[in-house]
Image (cartoon, helix red, strand yellow):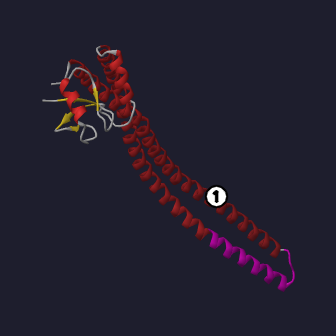
Amino acid sequence: MPTPTIEKLLVLQERDSRRLSLENQLRGVPRDVAAVEEKIAGERTSIEAARTEGQQLEARKKALEGEIGAAQEQVARYRSQQLQVRKNDEYQALGHQIDGSLGQVGTLEEEELKVMYAIDEAKRRFAQASADHQQNIAGHEARIKVLSEREANLQAELATVRAAVDAARAQVDESVLRVYDRISAKPGMPAVVAVHEGRCGGCHLKISSNVDSETRKADKITICDQCGRIVYWEA
């Protein structure tokens, strides 16, 4: 049977274990929130990419309109010059230039039609992508809200558990607490374990006959000679 001191240490250890678990969970919340925020940023980047595509096409359409207008003005100038020339070869030369400019206008107008079609497609894709990404963002924001609520609940529970830890520590002798704290500070909780069939419940190695005997006396805390944990004999 565990001694009263061991029983108090086991209560403290159980509460300490819960405290450590809560603290670890709380440390994970900011990481989870950051991961979700990164997803939101990715969704917004995708929306902006779709928007940029449309803006670039609109800019190309405007540039084409300017090029078409310039080519049409050139045609008008050539025709005006034709009315002023008297030589047939000059008239024909201007005719060739007019044909060339009209061909340029035709090519530009064909490209403009393609760009206009691409703009319509880009608008459709943007509308769909925007709706999809906004829906995803709403889901991510809901996840962040859940994480925030979880953080608040964990903080509240942790405050209660820390108070319980303090209460449990107050029940343990100061000299025993120093030993417990020294062992607990090392990785590998629990610090207080039972002996089963001559083996430490922490490291699972066989304890010496002297340590085994001391655990059975139960008149003081006993330390495992293999791993340094506090051990006790359990009937």
Please tell me which residue is depicted at 18% across the width and 27% down the height of the picture.
216
Q: Is residue 2 left or right of residue 137?
A: left
Quadrant of the rendered structure where residue 228 is? top left
What's under tag 1, amino acid-wise? Lys
Q: Quadrant of residue 198?
A: top left
Say what secondary structure mark 1 lies in. helix
User: Overall secondary structure of the magenta stretch?
Assistant: helix
| Closer to us: 131 or 184 | 184
Asked if residue 159 can be seen in this view, the reply is no
Q: Which residue is mark 1?
A: 62
User: Could one spot residue 16 in this view of the protein?
Assistant: yes
225 sits to left or right of 49: left
Magenta-colored stretch includes residue 200: no
Q: Which of the two residues, 112 or 153, is positioned nearer the viewer here?
A: 153
Relative vertical location of residue 54 with respect to residue 191 in this rendering, above or below: below
Residue for point 72% across, 68% down: 71
Q: Position of residue 121 (x, y in %)?
A: 47, 60
Quadrant of the drawing holding the N terminus: top left
Residue 33: percent from the left, percent from the top? Answer: 42, 38
* Magenta region, residue range: 84-108
The residue drawn where x is 53% and y is 53% is 49
Q: Position of residue 89 (x, y in %)?
A: 83, 86
Label 1 CA crowd tier, 10 Å (few <14, some 14–19, many 20+): few
What quarter of the picture does the C terminus occupy?
top left
- Most distant residue in the right direction: 86
Q: Residue at x 34, y 25 (%)?
A: 180
Image: 61 above or below 191: below
